[in-house]
């Protein structure tokens, strides 16, 4: 399916890799600013093989190598690759099962995902094997990474639960790294690059890719704050003011190639749907996400006027997710939406939605974890799947 909702300011030129520099970074980071009949024959049940974690290997780097010298990533749990592992007081962590079950080695890395996350997938398309390491991981366990420019491929500053506002996440999760502090951490890296190079790191920074995915947590907290007096318009304006400030800081530090992911259909998250008696999406949250995108689009257009050397891409994550999940298309006559009064399904574990749960003697069951981990309410239903199966997907198009 083609990606939709992508707004590009101007063509992004292909950039060569960085010139080989063999200077060493200082081991200590210096602080810096910021699916009537005859009698049935006896049925022999052939057990389906037990489901096993499916590990998707990372694609190999492109033959010509990475297309940018480094990648710098900011935001929340959509792109966090382990930052919060190092926040002792944080209640927003993903360093335990079932997180990482589809990651190589089935390791819980701190990604809020069964495997690779958005940050990994995007940088893979740029020739890297996965996201660069988290800033706090580098500080605590991997300082060698920062000792040679030849090994440097960027840093991930994202922190699950964080937002554009300084307080977002720090009440709900006690400790997260907000955007303002993430930008400050980048400033520290910028300073160390300067020291390692013996001068300005502009040649690296200006050709590097900056990815930002943030805003969902700000909207979550606004939605549950019964004491707020802010209207939606005022709240979104406040978020845009903060977004603008963070972007201006990055631009001041030399960023020129920026990719932004807007807020997706957060009202359709499984947890949010538990608050809807029908089990459907929380449309109020989705409305917030749509307004956020429109205002962010205007902000980026204005910034382009002020900073003509800046290149940016703005992904409409709301439209991407709703199209993918078939929530945006309510037209029964649309392509792929064949209307039938009922569906009758036959077969094996590919389409079983719980039959074997009722067969006392069978060993072919899927009513235990990890089956159902991605099904609503994380419930093993008897489907031989992590979530919905082939029968469910076909049914989505047919009724």
Image (cartoon, grey):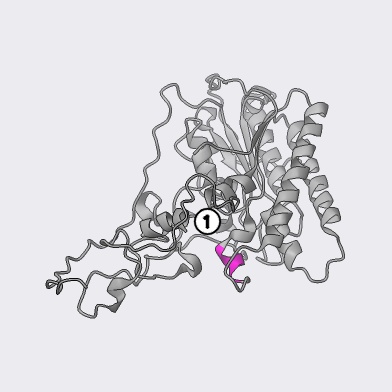
The x, y position of residue 20, in whole percent, is 52, 20
Q: Is residue 169 visible?
A: no
The x, y position of residue 207, in whole percent, is 63, 25
Q: Is residue 46 magenta?
A: no
The count of marks equals 1
The single residue placed furthest to the front in the displayed view is: 36
The x, y position of residue 301, in whole percent, is 78, 32
Residue extent of the magenta highlight: 270-274
State whether residue 141 is above or below residue 387: above
Q: Is residue 279 visible?
A: yes
User: What secondary structure do most residues of the magenta stretch adopt?
Assistant: helix
Residue linked to disc 1: 112
State whether residue 359 is above or below residue 164: below
Q: In this image, 50 relative to 147: left or right?
A: left
The x, y position of residue 40, in whole percent, is 15, 72
Q: Secondary structure at mark 1?
A: loop
Q: In this image, 223 relative to 139: left or right?
A: right
Q: Nearer the viewer, residue 99 or 333?
A: 333
Residue 9: image quadrant is top right
Q: Residue at x 41, y 65 (%)?
A: 372
State whether residue 146 is above or below residue 397: above
Using a 10 Å C-alpha cutoff, classify the residue at mark 1 as few (fewer than 14 neighbours), some (14 to 19) or many (20 or more): many
Q: Nearer the viewer, residue 355 or 366?
A: 355
Q: In this image, 297 relative to 151: left or right?
A: right
Q: Nearer the viewer, residue 76 or 291?
A: 291
Q: Nearer the viewer, residue 307 or 235?
A: 235
Residue 346: image quadrant is bottom left
Q: Residue at x 12, y 73 (%)?
A: 42
């Amino acid at each position: 399916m083609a990606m939709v909702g992508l707004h590009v300011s101007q063509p992004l030129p292909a950039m060569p890799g960085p010139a080989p520099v063999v200077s060493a970074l200082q081991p200590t980071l210096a602080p810096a600013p910021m699916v009537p009949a005859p009698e049935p024959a006896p049925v022999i049940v052939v057990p389906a093989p037990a489901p096993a974690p499916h590990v998707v290997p990372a694609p190999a780097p492109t033959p010509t190598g990475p297309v940018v010298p480094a990648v710098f990533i900011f935001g929340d749990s959509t792109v966090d690759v382990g930052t919060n592992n190092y926040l002792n007081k944080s209640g927003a962590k993903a360093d335990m099962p079932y997180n990482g079950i589809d990651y190589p080695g089935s390791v819980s890395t701190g990604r809020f995902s069964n495997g690779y996350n958005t940050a990994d997938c995007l940088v893979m398309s740029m020739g890297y094997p996965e996201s660069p390491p988290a800033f706090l991981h580098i500080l605590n366990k991997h300082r060698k990474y920062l000792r040679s420019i030849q090994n440097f491929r960027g840093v991930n500053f994202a922190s699950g639960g964080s937002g554009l506002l300084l307080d977002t996440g720090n009440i709900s999760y006690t400790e997260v790294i907000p955007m303002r502090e993430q930008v400050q951490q980048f400033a520290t890296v910028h300073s160390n690059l300067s020291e390692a190079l013996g001068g300005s790191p502009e040649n690296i920074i200006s050709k590097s890719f900056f990815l930002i995915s943030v805003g969902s947590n700000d909207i979550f907290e606004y939605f549950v704050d019964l004491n707020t007096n802010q209207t939606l318009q005022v709240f979104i304006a406040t978020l845009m003011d903060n977004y603008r400030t963070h972007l201006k800081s990055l631009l001041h530090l030399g960023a020129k190639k920026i990719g932004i992911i807007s807020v997706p259909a957060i009202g359709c998250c499984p947890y949010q749907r538990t608050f809807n008696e029908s089990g459907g999406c929380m449309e109020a949250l989705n409305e917030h996400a749509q307004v956020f995108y429109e205002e962010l689009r205007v902000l980026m257009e204005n910034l382009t006027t002020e900073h003509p050397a800046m290149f940016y891409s703005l992904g409409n994550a709301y439209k991407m997710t709703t199209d993918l999940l078939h929530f945006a298309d309510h037209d029964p006559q649309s392509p792929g939406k064949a209307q039938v009064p009922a569906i009758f399904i036959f077969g094996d574990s590919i389409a079983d939605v719980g039959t074997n749960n009722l067969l006392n003697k069978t060993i072919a069951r899927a009513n235990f974890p990890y089956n159902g981990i991605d099904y609503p309410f994380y419930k093993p239903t008897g489907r031989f799947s992590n979530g919905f199966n082939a029968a469910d997907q076909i049914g989505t198009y047919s009724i």
